[in-house]
Amino acid sequence: MKKNKTKSDKYIEELEEKIIDLRIQLKSEKKSIDLINESHNKLVARLIHDLKNPAGVVTSFSEMILEDIDFYDADKLKKHIGIIKKAADYSILFLNRTSKFLRLKSPKMAYLFSKLDYIDLLNQVVDRHIPLALDKGINIISKSETTSEILMIDSEEMDKTISNIVENAIRYSNENTTITISVTITKNTVETLITDDGVGVCKENIAKVFDEYFVVNTYSNDKEKCVGLGLTMSKIIIEQHQGKIYFKSELDKGAEVKITLPRMS
C-alpha cells in the first residue's frame, strides 16, 4: 500500500510540473499574441493615418468637379484631375510598400539565394539610375577595388535594396551635386559605401531612420511624398543576407549608407 501511495505521489508531482510548464507556455503564447495584436493595431492606425488625407483629396476634388463641371475650362480640369491622380498614386504606392514590408516580415518569406557577381549587380543598378540623376544634374561616381566578387545573394531583393538606397540619395540630393558609390574588399566582407551631398539628417533623428514609417521630411527634394519604409526594408533584407547596414549623416551635409556583406569562404 505504501508503495502504491509513493507511485501516486510521484504521478501527482509529475502532473503538477506539467501543469506549471503548460501555464508558462500559455503565458508566453499570450504575450506573443498580445505583441502581434499590438503590431496589427499600430499597422491599422498607420494605414488610416496615411490614407485618410489622400482619400479626402480625391473625394473633395471629385465633388468639386462634379458640382461645377459646366464651369470648368480645360486647364482647370486638367489641374484638378492631376491633383486627384497624385493622391491616388501615393495611396497605391503606400499600399504596395506596406504589402512588400509585411511580406518581408513574414516567417514564410522565402529568399532565393544563389551564387552571383555582386559587382555586376551593383553596376546594373547604377546604370539604371544614371538618367534619373542626370535630370537633376547629379553626377554618380562608382568605383570598386575589384571587377568581380561572387556572393551568395537573392538577386531580386538585393537589387531592390541597392536601388532604394541610390534612389534616396538622388531624391534627397540638391541639384548639381555628386553621389559616390564605392566598394571595398576586406578579408571577410564586401563593404559598399553610398554617400551623397544632400539635405542630411539631424543627430536626433539618425537613430530612427530604420524605424517603420519614419520620415525625416514628408516630401523629398523632388516634391514626392515619402512612405518611410525604404531603409526599414533594406535593413531586413541585408540582415537576411547575414550582413549589416549603417547610416551616418549631418544636417545639410549629406548622408552615408554603408552595407557590409559576408564574402564566400
Image (cartoon, rainbow, N blue to C red):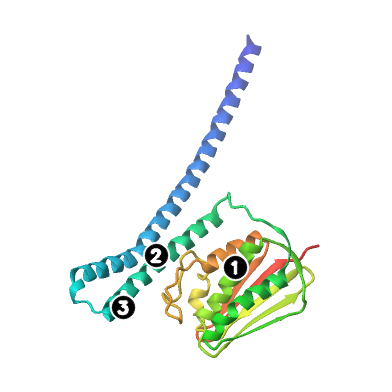
* Label 2 element class: helix
Quadrant occupied by the C terminus: bottom right
Question: Image check: 216 left or right of 66?
Answer: right
Spatial CA distance of label 2 from label 3 is 19 Å
Element carrying mark 1: helix
* Residue 250 lies in quadrant: bottom right
Residue 91's tag is 2
Residue at the spot 23% in from the left edge and 71% down from the top edge: 65
Q: Identify the amino acid type marked 1.
A: Thr
Query: Could you tell me residue 179's position as x and y percent?
Result: 60, 84
Quarter where residue 131 is shown: bottom right
Relative to 7, is 263 on the left or the right?
A: right
| Badge 1 or badge 3: first in the primary sequence | 3
Q: Is residue 238 visible?
A: no
Work out whether 108 lies above or below 69: above
Q: Which mark is residue 147?
A: none
Q: CA distance from mark 1 to mark 3?
A: 35 Å
Q: Which residue is mark 1?
A: 161
Q: CA distance from mark 2 to mark 1?
A: 22 Å
In this rendering, which labeled residue sits more in front, label 2 or label 1? 2
Q: Quadrant of residue 80?
A: bottom left
- Residue 235, x across and y down, in percent: 59, 65
Q: On the image, numbered disc 3 is attached to which residue?
A: 79
Q: Would you place residue 10 above or below residue 20 in this image?
A: above
Foreground label between 2 and 3:
3
